[in-house]
Amino acid sequence: MQTVAPGIIEVRNVFKSFKTVQAVRGIDLQIGAGQFVAILGPNGAGKTTLVEMIEGIQRPDKGEILIMGKTWKGNEDYLRQIIGLSLQETHFIDKLSVWETFRLFASFFGIGKERCEEVMNLVALEEKRKAWVVNLSGGQRQRLALGISMLNKPRILLLDEPTTGLDPNARREIWAILRKLKEQSGASLILTTHYMEEAEQLCDYIVIMDHGKILKEGTLDLLLGEIRDIPIQPVAPRKITLDDLFISLTGRHLDD
């Protein structure tokens, strides 16, 4: 377990099942203020279920989750004010423009036009101000979803596989926005992904999950430094990666 300042998010011995599927099995996790944390694992690892419990969408069957020292029960209004989130598939009204969509969501928080302009520029959608949402590309829609999640200047940003299905250029555009956010904000970020490069590029701390459990966690250097007996071809030496670590832990690739 990492040593951090008092946890902005604390997950304590959390379990969650759906009928016969045990999605999360006894997870403990602490995330400090300002940390960018990647939760890495293949499809079905339990990443989304864990994040949905942190978001308050799902409730643990056992254990507890504290956000700023508070549980969701009885603190819903406060926690929604400090959390921004973007789900795997975010749906907007097709026949609203980008600007109208920003203004609609800003109204939920009593946010004015100035902040909408600021965020629209941050996610590079100013040229699409008048475009209907239905006419946006996949990458532009994801940038819109990311912008909406940042409108309320959240202290905690939760992104569930924000670049899944995007082409490499669109994925790197999202990365650039998140790097800029990291430079300008003290927010904590939890990012779920099965792209090892995404975790390496964006996050200070890596959590590797499979079958509802945390297999390893730590800084990138710490995790890669622990790998032993990874076969590397002597003819073409290469850098050891998070996928190598996952293979050493499970015997399979992250994207299997």
Image: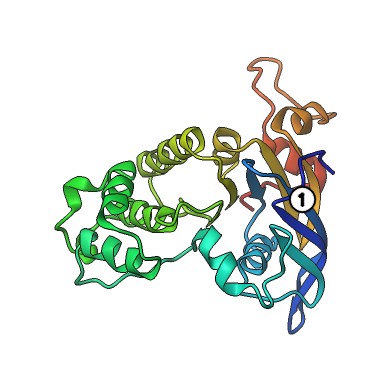
View extreme (left): residue: 130
Q: Residue beneath label 1, please?
A: 30
The residue located at (73%, 27%) in the rendering is 221
Determine the residue located farthest toward the bottom in the rendered image: 19
- In this orientation, does residue 77 appear? yes
Q: Position of residue 198 (x, y in %)?
A: 54, 40
Please provide percent x and percent y for residue 35: 64, 41
Name the element at disc 1. strand
Q: Is residue 91 left or right of residue 206?
A: left
Task: Name the one closer to the observer, 228 or 213.
Answer: 213
69 horizontally vs 84: left or right: right
Residue 35 as seen in the image, left or right of residue 224: left
Q: Nearer the viewer, residue 156 or 86?
A: 156
Count the marks.
Answer: 1
Residue drawn 66% across the image and 15% down it: 235
Residue 20: image quadrant is bottom right
Given the image, on which type of amino acid does mark 1 rest?
Gln
Q: Tell me where residue 249 appears, x and y as whole percent.
A: 81, 45
Near mark 1 (Cα within 10 A), the count class, few <14, some 14-19 or many ≥20, is: some
In this view, 112 is above or below 244: below
User: Can the viewer see residue 193?
Assistant: no
- The image quadrant where one finds the N terminus is top right
Residue 76 location, quadrant: bottom right
Colour mapping? rainbow
- Position of residue 202 relative to residue 240, above or below, is below
